[in-house]
Image (cartoon, grey):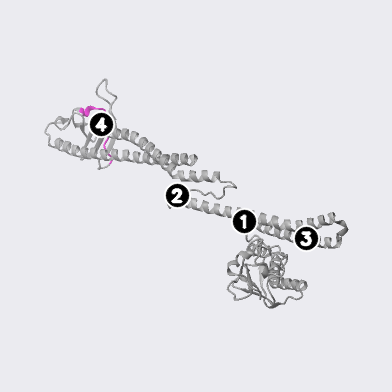
Amino acid sequence: MSGIRVRTTVVSALLVLVVLTAAAVALVTAQRAVLTESVDELLDRRAAAVLETVEASTTPPPVDLAADGDEESFAVVTDLSGAVVASTAGGSRDLPLRAPAGEDPRFATVAVPSSEPAGDGGASFRLRSERAGDLVVHTATPLDDVDESVQALIRGLAISVPLTTILLAAGVWLLVGRVLRPVEAIRRNVAEIGGDTLDRRVPEPTSRDEIARLAVTMNAMLDRIEQASVEQRRFVDDASHELRSPLARMRTDLEVDLQHPAQADPAATLERVHDDVAELERLVDDLLTLARSDAAGPSATTANQPPVDLDDVVLDAVARVRARRPGVVIETTDVAAARVGGRRSQLARAVGNLLENAATHGRPPIAVRLAQRDGWAQLEVADAGPGIPEADADRVFDRFVRLDPARSHDASGTGLGLSIVRAIAVAHGGTVFVDAGRPSGTRVVMRIPTGALPSSPAGE
Protein backbone atom coordinates (compact mmCIF):
# COMPACT_ATOMS: atom_id res chain seq x y z
CA MET A 1 0.00 0.00 0.00
CA SER A 2 2.91 2.35 0.76
CA GLY A 3 4.02 2.04 -2.87
CA ILE A 4 0.64 3.20 -4.14
CA ARG A 5 0.57 5.91 -1.50
CA VAL A 6 4.03 7.21 -2.44
CA ARG A 7 3.41 7.03 -6.18
CA THR A 8 0.05 8.77 -5.91
CA THR A 9 1.54 11.53 -3.74
CA VAL A 10 4.58 12.07 -5.97
CA VAL A 11 2.57 12.07 -9.21
CA SER A 12 -0.04 14.43 -7.76
CA ALA A 13 2.64 16.79 -6.42
CA LEU A 14 4.50 16.84 -9.74
CA LEU A 15 1.33 17.51 -11.70
CA VAL A 16 0.32 20.34 -9.38
CA LEU A 17 3.84 21.78 -9.48
CA VAL A 18 3.83 21.76 -13.27
CA VAL A 19 0.37 23.34 -13.43
CA LEU A 20 1.18 25.99 -10.83
CA THR A 21 4.51 26.80 -12.49
CA ALA A 22 2.82 27.21 -15.86
CA ALA A 23 0.13 29.37 -14.24
CA ALA A 24 2.82 31.44 -12.47
CA VAL A 25 4.71 32.03 -15.73
CA ALA A 26 1.47 33.04 -17.44
CA LEU A 27 0.57 35.35 -14.54
CA VAL A 28 3.99 37.06 -14.58
CA THR A 29 3.84 37.46 -18.34
CA ALA A 30 0.32 38.88 -18.17
CA GLN A 31 1.23 41.32 -15.39
CA ARG A 32 4.28 42.59 -17.27
CA ALA A 33 2.16 42.99 -20.41
CA VAL A 34 -0.56 44.93 -18.58
CA LEU A 35 1.92 47.22 -16.81
CA THR A 36 3.87 47.77 -20.03
CA GLU A 37 0.63 48.65 -21.82
CA SER A 38 -0.06 51.27 -19.13
CA VAL A 39 3.43 52.70 -19.66
CA ASP A 40 2.81 52.81 -23.42
CA GLU A 41 -0.37 54.81 -22.86
CA LEU A 42 1.58 57.21 -20.66
CA LEU A 43 4.19 57.60 -23.41
CA ASP A 44 1.43 58.30 -25.95
CA ARG A 45 0.21 61.22 -23.86
CA ARG A 46 3.75 62.39 -23.21
CA ALA A 47 4.60 62.35 -26.94
CA ALA A 48 1.50 64.38 -27.80
CA ALA A 49 2.42 66.99 -25.20
CA VAL A 50 6.02 67.20 -26.42
CA LEU A 51 4.96 67.60 -30.03
CA GLU A 52 2.51 70.32 -29.04
CA THR A 53 5.28 72.17 -27.16
CA VAL A 54 7.67 71.96 -30.10
CA GLU A 55 5.10 73.18 -32.55
CA ALA A 56 4.19 76.11 -30.27
CA SER A 57 7.81 77.12 -29.61
CA THR A 58 9.20 80.29 -31.29
CA THR A 59 12.83 79.71 -30.30
CA PRO A 60 15.25 78.20 -32.75
CA PRO A 61 16.18 74.61 -32.27
CA PRO A 62 17.15 72.92 -30.19
CA VAL A 63 14.11 73.71 -28.09
CA ASP A 64 14.47 73.21 -24.32
CA LEU A 65 11.79 70.80 -23.10
CA ALA A 66 12.81 71.02 -19.46
CA ALA A 67 9.37 72.21 -18.44
CA ASP A 68 7.81 69.11 -19.98
CA GLY A 69 10.15 66.55 -18.41
CA ASP A 70 10.61 64.99 -15.01
CA GLU A 71 13.50 63.50 -13.11
CA GLU A 72 13.35 60.13 -14.81
CA SER A 73 11.48 60.41 -18.08
CA PHE A 74 12.94 62.22 -21.05
CA ALA A 75 12.03 63.16 -24.60
CA VAL A 76 13.95 63.96 -27.79
CA VAL A 77 12.60 65.45 -31.00
CA THR A 78 14.69 65.10 -34.15
CA ASP A 79 14.22 65.82 -37.82
CA LEU A 80 14.40 63.07 -40.42
CA SER A 81 18.17 63.50 -40.70
CA GLY A 82 18.62 62.88 -36.97
CA ALA A 83 19.37 66.46 -35.91
CA VAL A 84 17.98 67.27 -32.47
CA VAL A 85 15.14 69.74 -32.64
CA ALA A 86 14.16 69.61 -28.96
CA SER A 87 15.05 67.57 -25.89
CA THR A 88 14.61 67.35 -22.18
CA ALA A 89 17.48 67.49 -19.73
CA GLY A 90 18.00 63.76 -19.89
CA GLY A 91 17.62 63.55 -23.62
CA SER A 92 21.37 63.55 -24.11
CA ARG A 93 21.61 59.93 -23.01
CA ASP A 94 22.90 57.39 -25.50
CA LEU A 95 19.59 56.31 -27.02
CA PRO A 96 19.04 54.15 -30.11
CA LEU A 97 17.00 56.86 -31.78
CA ARG A 98 15.70 55.58 -35.10
CA ALA A 99 12.77 56.82 -37.11
CA PRO A 100 10.02 54.23 -37.51
CA ALA A 101 9.48 52.89 -40.99
CA GLY A 102 5.78 53.70 -41.05
CA GLU A 103 3.43 56.23 -39.61
CA ASP A 104 2.53 54.09 -36.58
CA PRO A 105 4.55 54.56 -33.40
CA ARG A 106 7.22 52.02 -32.56
CA PHE A 107 7.71 50.81 -28.99
CA ALA A 108 10.86 49.15 -27.70
CA THR A 109 12.39 48.28 -24.36
CA VAL A 110 15.99 49.53 -24.25
CA ALA A 111 18.80 49.71 -21.74
CA VAL A 112 20.09 53.21 -21.04
CA PRO A 113 23.54 53.60 -19.41
CA SER A 114 23.61 55.27 -16.02
CA SER A 115 24.72 58.94 -15.92
CA GLU A 116 26.34 58.43 -12.51
CA PRO A 117 30.04 57.34 -12.49
CA ALA A 118 29.35 54.81 -9.74
CA GLY A 119 25.94 53.84 -11.10
CA ASP A 120 24.53 50.36 -11.39
CA GLY A 121 25.25 50.15 -15.11
CA GLY A 122 21.98 51.59 -16.39
CA ALA A 123 18.27 50.85 -16.32
CA SER A 124 15.56 49.59 -18.62
CA PHE A 125 13.48 52.20 -20.40
CA ARG A 126 10.41 52.01 -22.54
CA LEU A 127 11.08 53.99 -25.72
CA ARG A 128 8.39 55.33 -28.04
CA SER A 129 9.23 56.66 -31.50
CA GLU A 130 6.70 58.27 -33.89
CA ARG A 131 6.94 60.29 -37.04
CA ALA A 132 5.02 63.62 -37.10
CA GLY A 133 5.54 65.18 -40.52
CA ASP A 134 9.20 66.12 -40.84
CA LEU A 135 9.84 65.44 -37.17
CA VAL A 136 10.37 62.27 -35.11
CA VAL A 137 9.24 62.32 -31.48
CA HIS A 138 11.07 59.99 -29.10
CA THR A 139 9.76 59.65 -25.55
CA ALA A 140 11.06 57.27 -22.89
CA THR A 141 10.34 56.43 -19.29
CA PRO A 142 12.04 54.00 -16.92
CA LEU A 143 10.53 50.60 -16.22
CA ASP A 144 11.65 50.53 -12.61
CA ASP A 145 8.10 50.34 -11.26
CA VAL A 146 7.18 47.61 -13.74
CA ASP A 147 10.30 45.58 -12.91
CA GLU A 148 9.80 46.00 -9.17
CA SER A 149 6.16 44.94 -9.41
CA VAL A 150 7.01 41.90 -11.53
CA GLN A 151 9.89 40.94 -9.24
CA ALA A 152 7.62 41.20 -6.21
CA LEU A 153 5.13 38.91 -7.91
CA ILE A 154 7.91 36.46 -8.83
CA ARG A 155 9.16 36.41 -5.23
CA GLY A 156 5.66 35.76 -3.95
CA LEU A 157 5.08 32.97 -6.46
CA ALA A 158 8.49 31.46 -5.70
CA ILE A 159 7.30 30.98 -2.13
CA SER A 160 3.62 30.19 -2.68
CA VAL A 161 4.02 27.63 -5.50
CA PRO A 162 6.38 25.25 -3.62
CA LEU A 163 4.45 25.78 -0.38
CA THR A 164 1.15 24.97 -2.10
CA THR A 165 2.72 21.88 -3.67
CA ILE A 166 4.02 20.70 -0.30
CA LEU A 167 0.67 21.27 1.39
CA LEU A 168 -1.15 19.45 -1.41
CA ALA A 169 1.31 16.54 -1.24
CA ALA A 170 0.73 16.28 2.51
CA GLY A 171 -3.03 16.34 1.96
CA VAL A 172 -2.84 13.67 -0.74
CA TRP A 173 -0.60 11.54 1.49
CA LEU A 174 -3.09 11.70 4.35
CA LEU A 175 -6.12 11.23 2.09
CA VAL A 176 -4.67 8.24 0.25
CA GLY A 177 -3.63 6.71 3.55
CA ARG A 178 -7.16 7.08 4.86
CA VAL A 179 -8.65 5.67 1.66
CA LEU A 180 -6.29 2.69 1.66
CA ARG A 181 -6.79 1.94 5.36
CA PRO A 182 -9.79 -0.35 4.70
CA VAL A 183 -7.83 -2.07 1.92
CA GLU A 184 -5.00 -2.74 4.36
CA ALA A 185 -7.52 -4.12 6.85
CA ILE A 186 -8.87 -6.41 4.12
CA ARG A 187 -5.33 -7.52 3.25
CA ARG A 188 -4.48 -8.31 6.87
CA ASN A 189 -7.65 -10.35 7.31
CA VAL A 190 -7.12 -12.27 4.08
CA ALA A 191 -3.50 -12.97 5.05
CA GLU A 192 -4.71 -14.55 8.31
CA ILE A 193 -7.30 -16.79 6.63
CA GLY A 194 -6.15 -20.37 6.25
CA GLY A 195 -7.63 -23.74 5.51
CA ASP A 196 -8.96 -24.05 9.06
CA THR A 197 -10.33 -20.49 9.26
CA LEU A 198 -12.34 -20.26 6.06
CA ASP A 199 -15.33 -19.05 8.07
CA ARG A 200 -13.64 -15.68 8.68
CA ARG A 201 -14.64 -12.69 6.59
CA VAL A 202 -13.10 -9.31 5.81
CA PRO A 203 -14.62 -6.13 7.27
CA GLU A 204 -17.06 -4.38 4.97
CA PRO A 205 -16.93 -0.54 5.09
CA THR A 206 -20.22 1.26 5.57
CA SER A 207 -19.55 3.46 2.54
CA ARG A 208 -20.88 2.42 -0.84
CA ASP A 209 -17.69 3.02 -2.80
CA GLU A 210 -15.31 0.78 -4.73
CA ILE A 211 -13.56 -0.46 -1.58
CA ALA A 212 -16.88 -1.49 -0.05
CA ARG A 213 -17.73 -3.37 -3.24
CA LEU A 214 -14.29 -4.98 -3.12
CA ALA A 215 -14.95 -6.18 0.43
CA VAL A 216 -18.37 -7.54 -0.55
CA THR A 217 -16.86 -9.32 -3.55
CA MET A 218 -14.04 -10.70 -1.38
CA ASN A 219 -16.51 -12.07 1.15
CA ALA A 220 -18.58 -13.61 -1.63
CA MET A 221 -15.42 -15.27 -2.94
CA LEU A 222 -14.60 -16.55 0.56
CA ASP A 223 -18.15 -17.91 0.78
CA ARG A 224 -17.59 -19.83 -2.44
CA ILE A 225 -14.19 -21.08 -1.27
CA GLU A 226 -15.65 -22.19 2.05
CA GLN A 227 -18.55 -23.93 0.31
CA ALA A 228 -16.16 -25.63 -2.11
CA SER A 229 -13.96 -26.71 0.78
CA VAL A 230 -16.96 -28.10 2.66
CA GLU A 231 -18.15 -29.93 -0.43
CA GLN A 232 -14.66 -31.27 -1.07
CA ARG A 233 -14.33 -32.56 2.49
CA ARG A 234 -17.79 -34.09 2.29
CA PHE A 235 -16.93 -35.62 -1.06
CA VAL A 236 -13.70 -37.10 0.33
CA ASP A 237 -15.56 -38.44 3.37
CA ASP A 238 -18.29 -39.93 1.20
CA ALA A 239 -15.79 -41.39 -1.25
CA SER A 240 -13.79 -42.91 1.60
CA HIS A 241 -16.95 -44.43 3.04
CA GLU A 242 -18.05 -45.80 -0.32
CA LEU A 243 -14.62 -47.27 -0.97
CA ARG A 244 -14.39 -48.68 2.55
CA SER A 245 -17.66 -50.61 2.29
CA PRO A 246 -16.69 -53.10 -0.49
CA LEU A 247 -13.18 -53.35 0.90
CA ALA A 248 -14.58 -54.19 4.32
CA ARG A 249 -16.86 -56.85 2.82
CA MET A 250 -13.98 -58.42 0.90
CA ARG A 251 -11.76 -58.42 3.99
CA THR A 252 -14.54 -59.97 6.08
CA ASP A 253 -15.12 -62.74 3.53
CA LEU A 254 -11.42 -63.50 3.30
CA GLU A 255 -10.86 -63.41 7.08
CA VAL A 256 -13.80 -65.76 7.66
CA ASP A 257 -12.41 -68.22 5.12
CA LEU A 258 -8.93 -67.98 6.64
CA GLN A 259 -10.18 -68.52 10.17
CA HIS A 260 -12.53 -71.36 9.21
CA PRO A 261 -10.98 -73.02 6.18
CA ALA A 262 -12.93 -76.21 6.69
CA GLN A 263 -16.22 -74.37 6.33
CA ALA A 264 -15.03 -72.02 3.56
CA ASP A 265 -16.75 -71.93 0.20
CA PRO A 266 -14.06 -70.58 -2.17
CA ALA A 267 -16.42 -70.32 -5.12
CA ALA A 268 -18.95 -68.24 -3.19
CA THR A 269 -16.18 -66.08 -1.73
CA LEU A 270 -14.68 -65.47 -5.14
CA GLU A 271 -18.08 -64.53 -6.50
CA ARG A 272 -18.71 -62.03 -3.72
CA VAL A 273 -15.20 -60.59 -4.01
CA HIS A 274 -15.69 -60.33 -7.77
CA ASP A 275 -18.91 -58.36 -7.24
CA ASP A 276 -17.19 -56.08 -4.73
CA VAL A 277 -14.27 -55.48 -7.09
CA ALA A 278 -16.72 -54.66 -9.89
CA GLU A 279 -18.44 -52.19 -7.57
CA LEU A 280 -15.06 -50.62 -6.69
CA GLU A 281 -14.23 -50.39 -10.37
CA ARG A 282 -17.51 -48.60 -11.11
CA LEU A 283 -16.99 -46.25 -8.18
CA VAL A 284 -13.41 -45.40 -9.16
CA ASP A 285 -14.50 -44.89 -12.76
CA ASP A 286 -17.26 -42.53 -11.64
CA LEU A 287 -14.86 -40.61 -9.40
CA LEU A 288 -12.37 -40.22 -12.24
CA THR A 289 -15.14 -38.96 -14.53
CA LEU A 290 -16.16 -36.32 -12.00
CA ALA A 291 -12.54 -35.33 -11.35
CA ARG A 292 -11.87 -34.84 -15.07
CA SER A 293 -15.07 -32.83 -15.41
CA ASP A 294 -14.12 -30.58 -12.49
CA ALA A 295 -10.63 -30.03 -13.92
CA ALA A 296 -11.84 -29.29 -17.46
CA GLY A 297 -14.37 -26.63 -16.43
CA PRO A 298 -17.64 -25.61 -18.14
CA SER A 299 -17.86 -25.75 -21.94
CA ALA A 300 -14.32 -27.16 -22.26
CA THR A 301 -15.73 -30.41 -23.65
CA THR A 302 -17.39 -28.74 -26.64
CA ALA A 303 -14.30 -26.83 -27.82
CA ASN A 304 -13.28 -27.87 -31.35
CA GLN A 305 -15.38 -31.04 -31.19
CA PRO A 306 -17.19 -32.52 -34.21
CA PRO A 307 -21.00 -32.70 -34.23
CA VAL A 308 -22.65 -35.72 -32.62
CA ASP A 309 -25.99 -37.22 -33.65
CA LEU A 310 -27.61 -37.29 -30.24
CA ASP A 311 -30.52 -39.40 -31.47
CA ASP A 312 -28.08 -42.19 -32.43
CA VAL A 313 -26.48 -41.94 -29.00
CA VAL A 314 -29.90 -42.22 -27.33
CA LEU A 315 -30.99 -45.24 -29.39
CA ASP A 316 -27.67 -47.03 -28.76
CA ALA A 317 -28.01 -46.42 -25.00
CA VAL A 318 -31.61 -47.71 -25.07
CA ALA A 319 -30.46 -50.86 -26.85
CA ARG A 320 -27.81 -51.51 -24.19
CA VAL A 321 -30.28 -51.07 -21.33
CA ARG A 322 -32.79 -53.37 -23.02
CA ALA A 323 -30.08 -56.00 -23.41
CA ARG A 324 -29.13 -55.81 -19.71
CA ARG A 325 -32.73 -55.52 -18.46
CA PRO A 326 -34.99 -57.55 -20.74
CA GLY A 327 -38.11 -56.81 -18.66
CA VAL A 328 -37.80 -53.03 -18.86
CA VAL A 329 -40.14 -51.34 -21.36
CA ILE A 330 -38.62 -48.27 -23.01
CA GLU A 331 -40.61 -46.21 -25.51
CA THR A 332 -38.60 -44.33 -28.17
CA THR A 333 -41.30 -43.26 -30.62
CA ASP A 334 -40.70 -39.58 -29.82
CA VAL A 335 -36.95 -39.60 -30.47
CA ALA A 336 -36.27 -37.07 -33.25
CA ALA A 337 -33.03 -36.13 -34.95
CA ALA A 338 -30.76 -33.74 -33.00
CA ARG A 339 -27.10 -32.79 -33.38
CA VAL A 340 -24.87 -31.24 -30.75
CA GLY A 341 -21.17 -30.53 -30.40
CA GLY A 342 -19.18 -32.54 -27.87
CA ARG A 343 -17.71 -35.94 -27.04
CA ARG A 344 -19.83 -38.91 -28.06
CA SER A 345 -18.53 -41.09 -25.22
CA GLN A 346 -19.45 -38.56 -22.54
CA LEU A 347 -22.89 -37.92 -24.01
CA ALA A 348 -23.44 -41.68 -24.16
CA ARG A 349 -22.40 -41.90 -20.50
CA ALA A 350 -24.92 -39.20 -19.52
CA VAL A 351 -27.79 -40.76 -21.51
CA GLY A 352 -26.97 -44.21 -20.15
CA ASN A 353 -26.98 -42.92 -16.57
CA LEU A 354 -30.40 -41.31 -17.09
CA LEU A 355 -31.84 -44.56 -18.46
CA GLU A 356 -30.22 -46.66 -15.71
CA ASN A 357 -31.55 -44.27 -13.06
CA ALA A 358 -35.08 -44.56 -14.47
CA ALA A 359 -34.83 -48.35 -14.75
CA THR A 360 -33.40 -48.72 -11.24
CA HIS A 361 -35.49 -46.27 -9.24
CA GLY A 362 -38.64 -45.97 -11.35
CA ARG A 363 -41.18 -48.27 -12.89
CA PRO A 364 -41.89 -49.03 -16.53
CA PRO A 365 -42.82 -47.91 -18.99
CA ILE A 366 -39.91 -45.50 -19.51
CA ALA A 367 -40.65 -42.84 -22.10
CA VAL A 368 -37.72 -41.27 -23.94
CA ARG A 369 -38.23 -38.06 -25.95
CA LEU A 370 -35.69 -36.08 -27.93
CA ALA A 371 -36.32 -32.86 -29.87
CA GLN A 372 -34.28 -29.99 -31.24
CA ARG A 373 -35.68 -26.46 -31.20
CA ASP A 374 -34.53 -22.86 -30.61
CA GLY A 375 -30.85 -23.82 -30.57
CA TRP A 376 -31.27 -26.55 -27.95
CA ALA A 377 -31.44 -30.34 -28.01
CA GLN A 378 -33.78 -31.47 -25.22
CA LEU A 379 -33.77 -35.05 -23.94
CA GLU A 380 -36.51 -36.22 -21.56
CA VAL A 381 -36.50 -39.51 -19.66
CA ALA A 382 -39.75 -40.18 -17.77
CA ASP A 383 -40.82 -43.20 -15.72
CA ALA A 384 -43.99 -44.25 -13.85
CA GLY A 385 -42.36 -44.70 -10.45
CA PRO A 386 -43.20 -43.04 -7.13
CA GLY A 387 -41.53 -39.80 -8.20
CA ILE A 388 -39.13 -37.47 -6.44
CA PRO A 389 -40.33 -35.02 -3.76
CA GLU A 390 -40.02 -31.41 -4.79
CA ALA A 391 -37.65 -30.74 -1.88
CA ASP A 392 -35.23 -33.34 -3.27
CA ALA A 393 -35.51 -32.32 -6.95
CA ASP A 394 -32.16 -30.55 -6.91
CA ARG A 395 -30.48 -32.62 -4.19
CA VAL A 396 -30.61 -35.79 -6.30
CA PHE A 397 -27.81 -34.34 -8.44
CA ASP A 398 -25.44 -34.04 -5.47
CA ARG A 399 -22.70 -36.59 -5.13
CA PHE A 400 -23.31 -39.76 -3.12
CA VAL A 401 -26.94 -38.82 -2.52
CA ARG A 402 -29.36 -41.71 -2.15
CA LEU A 403 -33.01 -41.02 -1.39
CA ASP A 404 -35.37 -43.32 0.48
CA PRO A 405 -34.26 -46.94 -0.20
CA ALA A 406 -37.95 -47.90 -0.55
CA ARG A 407 -37.96 -45.99 -3.82
CA SER A 408 -35.38 -48.35 -5.28
CA HIS A 409 -35.45 -52.05 -5.96
CA ASP A 410 -31.71 -52.01 -6.72
CA ALA A 411 -29.50 -50.27 -4.16
CA SER A 412 -26.20 -51.28 -5.71
CA GLY A 413 -25.53 -47.87 -7.31
CA THR A 414 -22.68 -45.59 -6.28
CA GLY A 415 -24.86 -42.50 -5.82
CA LEU A 416 -22.89 -40.67 -8.53
CA GLY A 417 -24.99 -41.38 -11.62
CA LEU A 418 -26.99 -38.15 -11.74
CA SER A 419 -23.97 -36.16 -10.53
CA ILE A 420 -22.08 -37.38 -13.58
CA VAL A 421 -25.05 -36.45 -15.81
CA ARG A 422 -25.02 -32.91 -14.45
CA ALA A 423 -21.23 -32.62 -14.81
CA ILE A 424 -21.37 -33.76 -18.44
CA ALA A 425 -24.32 -31.46 -19.24
CA VAL A 426 -22.57 -28.45 -17.70
CA ALA A 427 -19.32 -29.33 -19.52
CA HIS A 428 -21.32 -29.20 -22.77
CA GLY A 429 -22.79 -25.79 -21.88
CA GLY A 430 -26.16 -27.30 -20.95
CA THR A 431 -28.20 -28.15 -17.90
CA VAL A 432 -30.21 -30.96 -16.35
CA PHE A 433 -33.14 -30.82 -13.94
CA VAL A 434 -36.02 -32.82 -12.51
CA ASP A 435 -39.55 -31.80 -13.47
CA ALA A 436 -40.97 -31.67 -9.96
CA GLY A 437 -44.42 -30.52 -11.05
CA ARG A 438 -45.60 -33.95 -12.17
CA PRO A 439 -48.39 -35.61 -10.12
CA SER A 440 -46.66 -39.00 -10.36
CA GLY A 441 -43.54 -40.51 -11.79
CA THR A 442 -40.25 -38.80 -12.50
CA ARG A 443 -39.17 -36.86 -15.56
CA VAL A 444 -35.54 -35.79 -15.92
CA VAL A 445 -34.75 -33.22 -18.62
CA MET A 446 -31.28 -32.63 -20.09
CA ARG A 447 -30.76 -29.69 -22.45
CA ILE A 448 -27.63 -29.31 -24.61
CA PRO A 449 -27.04 -26.28 -26.89
CA THR A 450 -26.59 -27.05 -30.55
CA GLY A 451 -24.57 -23.89 -31.27
CA ALA A 452 -22.63 -23.37 -34.51
CA LEU A 453 -21.69 -26.90 -35.47
CA PRO A 454 -18.95 -27.79 -37.95
CA SER A 455 -19.80 -29.86 -40.97
CA SER A 456 -17.42 -32.76 -40.25
CA PRO A 457 -18.89 -36.19 -39.56
CA ALA A 458 -19.89 -37.14 -36.04
CA GLY A 459 -17.33 -39.01 -34.07
CA GLU A 460 -15.54 -39.43 -30.80
Secondary element under disc 2, as helix, strand or loop, is: loop
N-terminal of the two: label 2 or label 4? 4
N-terminal of the two: label 1 or label 4? 4
Q: Are marks 4 and 3 in contact (CB under 8 Å)?
A: no
Q: Are marks 3 and 2 in contact (CB under 8 Å)?
A: no
Look at discs 2 and 4 and give the one toward the viewer.
2
N-terminal of the two: label 3 or label 2? 2
Frontmost residue, 178 versus 460: 178
Cα separation, mark 3 vs mark 1, equals 27 Å
Q: Left or right: where does residue 146 sit relative to residue 15?
A: left
Look at discs 3 and 2 and give the one toward the viewer.
3
Q: On residue 276, which mark appears?
A: 3
Frontmost residue, 140 versus 91: 140
Q: Which residue is mark 4?
A: 144
N-terminal of the two: label 4 or label 3? 4
N-terminal of the two: label 2 or label 1? 2
Q: Which residue is mark 1?
A: 231
| Residue 93 is inside the magenta segment | yes
Q: Position of residue 341 (x, y in %)?
A: 66, 66
Cα separation, mark 3 vs mark 2, equals 56 Å
Q: Position of residue 281 (x, y in %)?
A: 76, 59
Look at discs 3 and 1 and give the one toward the viewer.
3
N-terminal of the two: label 3 or label 1? 1
Cα separation, mark 1 vs mark 4, equals 87 Å
Q: What range of the chain is rendered magenta?
A: 90-101
Frontmost residue, 265 versus 339: 265
